Amino acid sequence: MAEQELQVARMDEETMEYLNVLFSVCKRFNTDYYHADPKQRAFMDAVATHEYQLKKAHEKGLQRSAVPPFMGIVRSERSNNMPA
């Protein structure tokens, strides 16, 4: 049987930024991502993705309306017009 080589690639900067947001969200909600059930993981992923998108929009100088609302919750017009 032939041996398989394991190749490890360094994560890109964007992935590392997202993971930093994900782990800070997990810490805020006192949740261990790797031991969380699928429902908890889905929630952590949704919160982290939303916060990451807001962070990126803020860096680009965009308004909140440029980012999809969290889990489909409708934002007020005032909130949409605020900086991300």
Image (cartoon, grey):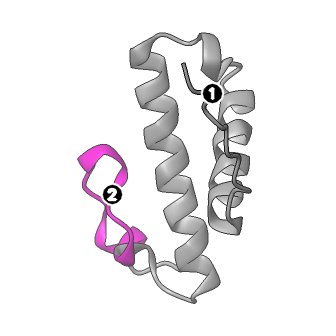
Q: Left or right: 45 with respect to 15?
A: left
Q: Quadrant of residue 16?
A: bottom right
Q: Position of residue 74 (x, y in %)?
A: 25, 55
The question of residue 61 being in magenta is answered with: no
Q: Is 66 or 38 nearer to us in this picture? A: 38
Residue 44, which numbered label? none
Q: Earlier in the sequence, mark 1 or mark 2?
A: 1
Magenta part of the chain: 66-80
Q: Is residue 84 visible?
A: no
Three-letter amino acid code of the residue under disc 2 = Pro
Q: Is 81 or 18 nearer to us in this picture? A: 18
Three-letter amino acid code of the residue under disc 1 = Glu
Above or below, 26 against 84 in this view is above
Residue under the image location 31 percent in, 44 percent down: 71
Residue with the mark numbered 1: 3
Residue with the mark numbered 2: 69
Q: Nearer the viewer, mark 1 or mark 2?
A: 1
Label 1 – label 2 distance at C-alpha: 48 Å
Q: Is residue 27 visible?
A: yes
All told, the count of numbered labels is 2
Residue under the image location 55 percent in, 55 percent down: 51
Q: Is 68 or 76 nearer to us in this picture? A: 68
